[in-house]
Amino acid sequence: MSSVEIQWMSTGEAARRLGVTVRTLYRLIDEGELPAYKFGRVIRLQENEVDAFISQSRIEPGKLQHLYPDARRELSEIEHSLR
């Protein structure tokens, strides 16, 4: 058995750590993106799993180009007209 003590977080604490509403936290849990545990009527999350979720959610450079395709096309047109 592991000698490391688990640090538990309430849903309110986890939501604050993530910077989201509790409702969004429940959606992340329900969609299987974030593990959670139910003890009777109480839902708890492991602090290390919340931190791991934060790390895994980091956006790598160049991954959001689909959100601004027109800006890229405009930049390409400007570069082409300067040649």
Image (tube, rainbow, N blue to C red):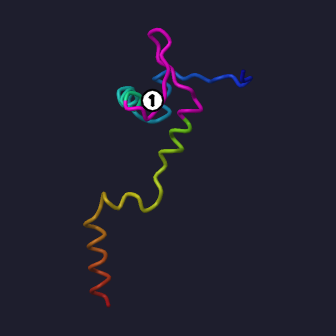
Q: Amino acid at mark 1?
A: Ala
- Residue toward you, 16 or 53: 53
Q: Quadrant of the C terminus?
A: bottom left
- Residue toward you, 31 or 46: 31
How far across and down, in percent of the image, does residue 68 sit? 29, 61
State the residue lying farthest toward the front. Answer: 1
Q: Secondary structure at mark 1?
A: helix
State the residue lying farthest toward the right. Answer: 3
- Left or right relative to 62: residue 9: right
Q: Is residue 56 above or below residue 10?
A: below
Within 10 Å of disc 1 (Cα), the crowding (few <14, some 14-19, many 20+) is some
Magenta stretch contains residue 41: yes
Residue 74 location, quadrant: bottom left
- Residue toward you, 33 or 50: 33
Magenta stretch in the rendered image: 31-50
State the residue lying farthest toward the top. Answer: 40
How far across and down, in percent of the image, does residue 7 sit? 62, 24
Q: Residue at x 30, y 57 (%)?
A: 67
Magenta stretch contains residue 53: no
How far across and down, in percent of the image, does residue 80 sit? 29, 85
